[in-house]
């Protein structure tokens, strides 16, 4: 871990939903010097000479078609809303932000490389802010490093951290706007332990079943669970990798029913596939907690699974919090994109564009492609800027340039992005935030499929 240099960093705002003395102290201590992003940007615009009014192009390589199109659309929504707000605050030193999107379709290294190169060569993008792209081997970082363009992405991969560590001078402008997927592993096992210590759940045995799909993200999380389980008194009863995508869960469910575990962790992440797991699990369930990765945050999970998803737990290291700070964002997002939109997904690129825009203004303006001198100033400002987004506190770890994770990586909630645990308690409503404690809005409910 990088040495803490928080004393010389800048913070835009902080706060959390509170209903206990500990939470009230947390809010009081972090919110007294809070400054909203729009107010800070307006102040920077007022205090510095306006630049030429030519638009600042922000590129984004997103899966606007293909199996991840639902997410791609929400990522674009987040960018559009952020750009609208930034421009309403005066742009970046007087220059309006213009978002340009290229479709990465089925993703993969070649398609993503081509999309990003078009953004740089044809559109002269000053920065590229992506959601996630699957199967790239983090080639995005090489494209941006070659062009001296700032990159903010949400691939949520430990391979980003390793790549930055391998050559920090080359990848100076590459940022992962959330913690890497590794932290899902120890965070999940720690959550089970906390749930049991609080008396909300009692494990029927010490077995965990871990079910990844055949992709880097899922496998890294699954391996991290397996590596951490023993520390909390768990043993791995089943570890089975399924295809990606996958909606035929019969063989896996047969093994789970033959040797029921205390908890099932499905680290596959496509919402439609995870809904099918529950539809096939509930008719003959085991007394196991069911935890799933990412997909349950999307509307499609509830729309397909309906009553079968009630009781499912999922987590995210990057999602809009259900707190007072994020309420205006939720309202603006749904007003602009409809009640069936997914702010929790769009919040990722929304926060990424705001963070970069503030850093660019602090640095004296954005650099263009191949402008190493100015883009290094922007990157340095991003490292110093502790940004309270609607997803929690984004603080980049020096030497790795991804966000810190609270509470498993760092114990100070004002310096790390919360690893949120949510539960679907009624599929007709939004999922409820049940952890971590400083942020939780309600408590865990025993799943309806449990038998006395």
Image (cartoon, helix red, strand yellow):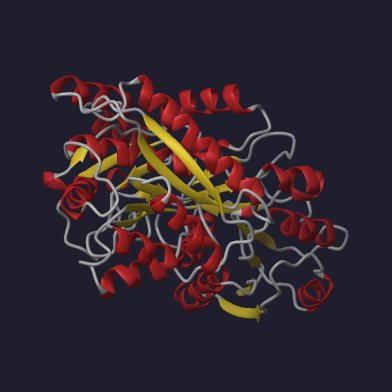
Whole-percent x, y for residue 196 in the image: 54, 58
On screen, residue 255 above or below 392: below
Locate residue 319, reporting x and y percent.
50, 44
- 136 left or right of 397 in image: right
- Between residues 179 and 245, which one lies in front from this camera angle? 245
Number of marks drawn: 0
Closer to us: 339 or 200? 339
Image point (29%, 59%), residue name: 401
Q: Residue at x 74, y 44 (%)?
A: 302
Q: Position of residue 247 (x, y in %)?
A: 79, 64
> Can residue 437 be seen by looking at this rendering?
no
Q: In the image as oriented, which residue stretches furthest toward the right?
A: 283
Towards the viewer: 301 or 53 = 53
- Residue 305 vertical position relative to residue 221 in the rendered view, above or below: above
The answer to whether one can see residue 287 in this image is yes
In the rendered image, which quarter is residue 94 located in? top left
Residue at image location 61% in from the left, 61% down from the top: 202
Q: Position of residue 260 (x, y in %)?
A: 74, 73
Q: Quadrant of the C terminus?
A: bottom right
Q: Residue furthest left?
A: 8
* Picture quadrant where residue 352 is located: top left
Q: What residue lies at 22% left-to-right and 34% top-to-bottom?
A: 361
Asked whether, in this view, residue 52 is left or right of residue 349, the answer is: left
* Placement of the N terminus among the 4 image quadrants: bottom left
């Amino acid at each position: 871990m990088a040495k803490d240099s928080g004393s010389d960093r800048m913070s835009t705002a902080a706060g959390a939903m509170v209903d206990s003395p500990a939470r009230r102290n947390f809010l009081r201590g972090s919110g007294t010097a809070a400054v909203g992003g729009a107010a800070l940007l307006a102040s920077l615009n007022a205090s510095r000479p306006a630049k030429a009014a030519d638009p600042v192009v922000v590129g984004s390589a997103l899966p606007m078609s293909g199996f991840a199109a639902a997410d791609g659309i929400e990522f674009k929504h987040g960018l559009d809303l952020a750009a609208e707000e930034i421009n309403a605050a005066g742009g970046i030193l007087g220059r309006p932000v213009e978002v340009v999107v290229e479709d990465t379709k089925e993703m993969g290294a070649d398609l993503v490389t081509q999309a990003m190169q078009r953004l740089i060569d044809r559109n002269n993008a000053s920065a590229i802010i992506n959601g996630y792209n699957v199967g790239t081997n983090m080639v995005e970082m090489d494209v941006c490093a070659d062009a001296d363009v700032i990159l903010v992405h949400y691939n949520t991969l430990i391979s980003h951290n390793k790549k930055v560590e391998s050559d920090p001078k080359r990848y100076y402008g590459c940022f992962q706007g959330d913690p890497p997927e590794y932290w899902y592993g120890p965070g999940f096992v720690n959550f089970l332990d906390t749930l049991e210590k609080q008396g909300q759940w009692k494990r029927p045995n010490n077995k965990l079943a871990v079910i990844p799909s055949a992709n880097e993200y899922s496998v890294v999380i699954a391996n991290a669970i397996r590596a951490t389980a023993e520390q909390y008194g768990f043993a791995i009863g089943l570890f089975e990798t399924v295809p990606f995508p996958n909606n035929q869960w019969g063989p896996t469910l047969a093994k789970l029913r033959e040797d029921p575990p205390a908890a099932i962790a499905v680290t596959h992440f496509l919402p439609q596939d995870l809904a099918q797991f529950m539809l096939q699990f509930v008719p003959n369930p085991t007394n196991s907690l069911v935890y799933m990765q990412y997909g349950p945050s999307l509307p499609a999970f509830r729309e397909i699974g309906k009553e079968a998803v009630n009781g499912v737990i999922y987590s995210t290291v990057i999602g809009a919090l259900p707190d007072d700070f994020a309420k205006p964002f939720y309202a603006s997002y749904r007003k602009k994109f409809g009640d069936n939109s997914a702010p929790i997904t769009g919040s990722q690129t929304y926060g990424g564009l705001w963070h970069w825009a503030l850093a660019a203004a602090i640095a004296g303006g954005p650099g263009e492609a191949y402008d190493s001198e100015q883009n290094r100033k922007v990157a340095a400002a991003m490292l110093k800027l502790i940004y309270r987004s609607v997803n929690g506190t984004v603080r980049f770890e020096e030497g790795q340039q991804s966000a810190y994770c609270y509470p498993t990586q760092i114990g100070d909630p004002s310096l790390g992005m919360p690893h949120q645990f949510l539960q679907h308690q009624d599929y007709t409503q939004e999922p409820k935030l049940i952890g971590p404690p400083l942020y939780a809005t309600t408590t865990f409910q025993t799943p309806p499929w449990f038998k006395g």
